[in-house]
Amino acid sequence: MAGAWDTLPIKDGAGTTRTFRVWDESGTGSGPYSFGQVFSDGTGSASQPGQVGSPGDVITVTLTVDTSIYADGDVLADTQTIANAMRINGGHGVLQSLQLVDPDDQGQPMDLYFFSVSHALGTENSAPSISDVNAIDVFGPVAIASGDYRDLGGCRVASVRGIGLMLEAAAGSRDLYVGAISRGTGTYAGGSLTLKLSFLWD
């Protein structure tokens, strides 16, 4: 009989049940097995069932920004939600690449800061005021440089690849959060920037 893919719950050394994708070489459900990807933590309860997830996702976030001219070092966009950024609650993943669409054609550099919980960076178009305690939760920064942009006439698009930043959602949540610090002197009359984030999931 030909083999078949199956799932198998196995407890790790800490006693946590993890669901593995396995290749059942017999095709009968009795093994022998070759192990594949870990799908989920926990026992597959009704509140968070075991999931055979996709390996990642591309999530679009519209960053709202102030419309007055910025100074280098100002909070460009205060912390905003990246909904369902990770595959499972408390999950881990890697920010692999990003794109930023600047409809105001400014092409200004900036730094992006990521969080597993929502901490304010400060007031937009003012100096950052995040507390020392909250800054411990920062992932990043990820820099977007002036040279990362390409001019498309009335707008500019930046692309940053090969980032490889490991991120973690808070327990009970799939969300992450992102804020931006200006590293230039842009004016964003339209009041928004579009950020596309490409994640690889564990």
Image: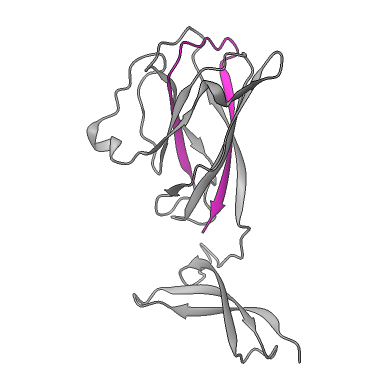
Give the residues in magenta: 175-202
Count the marks.
Answer: 0
Above/below status of 177 relative to 92: above
- Residue lying at the far front of the rendered structure: 147
Above/below status of 100 relative to 7: above
- Tell whether 152 sits left or right of 106: right
Out of 130 and 33, give the one closest to the viewer: 33
**Residue at position x 39%, y 14% from top?**
72
**Residue at position x 59%, y 85% from top?**
33
Measuring from the top left, give residue 182's x and y in whole percent.
Answer: 43, 19
Measuring from the top left, give residue 159's x and y in whole percent.
Answer: 60, 32
The quarter of the displayed image where residue 106 is located? top right
The quarter of the displayed image where residue 99 is located? top right
**Residue at position x 56%, y 52% from top?**
200
- Tell whether 21 sits left or right of 154: left
88 falls in the magenta region: no
Above/below status of 145 relative to 42: above
The quarter of the displayed image where residue 76 is located? top left
Out of 17 and 136, give the one closest to the viewer: 136
Measuring from the top left, give residue 56's x and y in whole percent.
Answer: 60, 52
Measuring from the top left, give residue 202's x and y in whole percent.
Answer: 51, 59
Figure coloring: one colour
Dominant SS in magenta: strand
Above/below status of 160 relative to 20: above
* Quadrant assignment for the N terminus: bottom right
